[in-house]
Amino acid sequence: MASTNTQWGMVIDVDKCIGCQGCVVACQSENNIPINTEDLFNQRRAIEWIRVERYWEGEFPDVKARFIPILCQHCNDAPCEPVCPVFATYHNNEGMNVQVYNRCIGTRFCANNCPYHVRFFNFWEPEWPETLTNQLNPDVTVRSRGIMEKCTFCIQRIRRTSREAARDGEELSDDSRELNPACVNACPTDTLFFGDLNDPDSKVAKLAKEEMSDDGRGYHLMPQYGTSPNVIYLKKVDESTKDSNGSHE
Amino acid sequence: MLPGDFQPPKRPTGRRIALFGALGLGGVVGLVVVVVIATFVISAWLGLPLDAFGLNEGPDQPIAFPHPTHVEDLGLDCTFCHRNVTVGAAATIPAVGFCMSCHITVGDDKPEVEKLRNFHTSGIPVDWVRVHRVPDHVNFVHEPHIRHFSEQYGGASGTCQLCHGDVGSMVKVQQVRSLKMGDCVDCHRDNEAPTDCTTCHY
């Protein structure tokens, strides 16, 4: 069982992201997310708990592609939480913003109040082609029509690993692939790190301490909203941004 | 006639008889409706069908597998057959091949054992009917429960009766505990187990 002062968090090193979409696919299959068709994208009803945004910088031939993976920031002061009339979304004692599907009544207030656009509404009953129904993850609830959903930091993996550690009398370690969310495991360039921000020995806590200092690369997305996220981004280092300080802010 | 004098009762008219008859019939129907509603309310409160008139009887299984024969007479442990119960989420029902380790020789003249052997030779798995089932949006895991209560109840097989009752004496397995959310959370509170929503819902 995770101790009560756990604070799950993620560090994303934007410098390493190559925009391969591996995390997106891994998340999609781990979490029983229905297939996003072209139609759904056009209707802006695609469901992607993590997405890779792409920006172009400069003029041809000196263009640079910039990638940034965006997922639920698990804010400590989450704008989505106070607007839910039925407490279907709340902050749990492990620092996560969680969504209780069976409690949700589908007002969509939370998604409208989220500045990161990382909450998704099921406008339709989810469907999979016949060939894919056997690959559904039995540890994750299939969300029905009319329900809000979002990144859970793959809580099913955290729960299972914590239980198995308790059973075998072992310590939880953030090196374990079983504990890490699917996106972290799938990343070929080690862009994503996951762990307990309150455990001073964890990778994320060390990175956070080092990079959130004055000369570090760390920043939060949209700090102007004061959401105090549990996801930390490390900004890109290359020739064009080396001298400018904090162009992301 | 003076006001206090005796008056013979008037004979009820035909219309009055019809009225009283209708009222009486309505009362009986109303009573039945109330009783039916009360039954629903009580069984919803208990979380189980009333244990009367066979309403809460377990379902018929493809093979009438008797727990008493195996548990009470043979003294088999629950974990001997439900092997995964101390390891993971599902307790699991043993495969036909597992039963055949005994039944290749035992129970020659029993028709139910004959059925079992037919399943074995045809290679079709038995489609047991589920008795206990939490909804899809709930994650129940056996292992931590067995681990937590084993010491107190003398081994893994002693803990099962907490939630399943005395299965060893049930010819047909039936559910005896509601195992609804209130039931789960009450026990979790009493034992200082986690009650965060994401313990059970994700």
Image (cartoon, coloured by chain):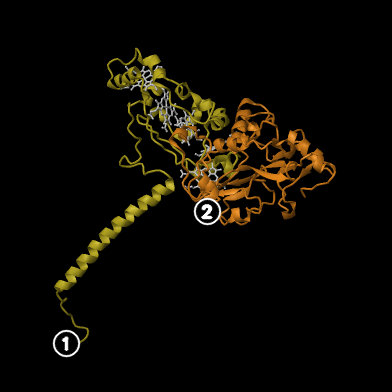
Chain colours: A orange, B yellow
Mark 2 secondary-structure assignment: loop
Residue A75 in percent (x, y) is at: 68, 48
| Residue B58 visible to an observer of this rendering | yes
How far apart marks 2 and 1 lie (CA) works out to 78 Å
Residue B125, image quadrant: top left
In what quadrant of the picture does the N terminus of chain A appear?
Answer: top right
Query: Closer to the camera, B189 or B122?
Result: B122
Quadrant of res A237: top right
Residue A197 appears in the picture as rendered: no
Letter of the chain that mark 1 sits on in the rendering: B
Q: Which mark is residue B1?
A: 1
A116 sits to left or right of B185: right
Q: Which residue is mark 2?
A: A106
Using residue B18 as the reference point, say whether residue B76 is left or right of it.
right
Nearer the observer, A31 or A197: A31
Label 2 Cα neighbours within 10 Å, binned few <14 / some 14-19 / many ≥20: some
Taking the view exactly as shown, the residue that stands out farthest to the front is A61
User: Could you tell me residue B195's position as x and y percent?
Assistant: 59, 43
Vertical side of B187 occupied by B171: above or below:
above
Label 1 crowd (10 A; few <14 / some 14-19 / many >=20): few
In the rendered image, residue B168, in percent from the top left (x then y), is placed at 41, 27
Task: Tell me the residue at 65%/26% (across/down).
Answer: A169
Going by the numbered disc 2, the residue's amino acid type is: Gly
Q: Image quadrant of residue A217?
A: top right
Q: Secondary structure at mark 1?
A: loop
Q: Nearer the viewer, mark 2 or mark 1?
A: 2
Percent across and percent down for residue A231 are 70, 43
